[in-house]
Image: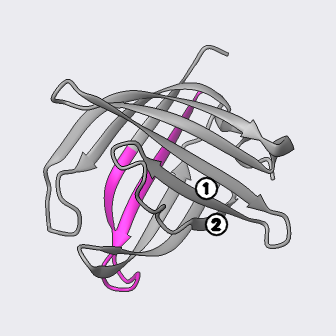
């Protein structure tokens, strides 16, 4: 239940994402942002709000909601994109941390085709963390990492 406690507070974020997902792209777009993370419901859930400062000078917000299932021991994670706040939420990625690495999976679609989604949390210290998103178009045989974010804590 306390797996995401490390993440509470304010962070600077450096993002790298592929220009196109599952299209053989090798063009990465880099940009910065900030994120504020706080617990909810006595630690059974948490929420973060991200601000992404995109290369063209604009910005947008996003919200992540996480909830812990005490029966299964799994976390459920949903994303709300501020560019389309009324769109349906993506399917929850579900998973847990083992030996300091968090792995979370979901089935979704991309361009009308089924994909598997994987979130990986790693490199976690008191002041740093890394999040990666990867997609698989072949049922999980191979994975393409399409987004990497390195976080640095702001303040204590």
**Coordinates of residue 56 in the picture (x, y in percent):** 15, 29
Residue for point 79% across, 47% down: 2
Residue 35 relative to residue 46: left or right: left
User: Is residue 143 in view?
Assistant: no
- Disc 2, disc 1: CB below 8 Å? no
Q: Is residue 140 magenta?
A: yes
In this rendering, the label closer to the viewer, 2 or 1: 2
Residue that carries the numbered disc 2 in the rendered image: 95
Residue for point 38% across, 63% down: 134
Image coloring type: one colour
Magenta residues span 127-148
Figure check: 115 above or below 84 = below
Figure check: 123 above or below 33 = below
Q: Secondary structure at mark 2?
A: strand
Residue that carries the numbered disc 1 in the rendered image: 101
Residue for point 81% across, 53% down: 1
- In the picture, the disc for residue 117 is none
Q: What is the quadrant of residue 138 in the picture? A: bottom left
**Coordinates of residue 153 in the picture (x, y in percent):** 56, 24
Figure check: 79 above or below 94 = above
């Amino acid at each position: 239940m306390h797996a995401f406690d490390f993440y509470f507070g304010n962070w600077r974020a450096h993002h790298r994402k592929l220009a196109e997902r599952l299209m053989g792209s090798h063009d990465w777009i880099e940009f910065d942002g900030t994120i504020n993370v706080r617990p909810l419901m006595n630690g059974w859930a948490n929420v973060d709000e991200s601000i992404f400062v995109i290369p063209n000078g604009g910005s947008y917000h996003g919200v992540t909601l996480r909830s812990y299932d005490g029966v299964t021991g799994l976390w459920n994670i949903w994303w709300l994109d501020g560019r389309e706040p009324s769109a349906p939420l993506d399917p929850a990625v579900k998973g847990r941390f083992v030996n300091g690495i968090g792995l979370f999976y979901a089935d979704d679609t991309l361009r009308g085709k089924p994909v598997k989604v994987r979130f990986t949390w790693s490199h976690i210290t008191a002041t740093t963390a890394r999040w990666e998103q990867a997609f698989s178009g072949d049922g999980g045989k191979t994975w393409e990492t399409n987004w990497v974010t390195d976080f640095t804590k702001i303040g204590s």
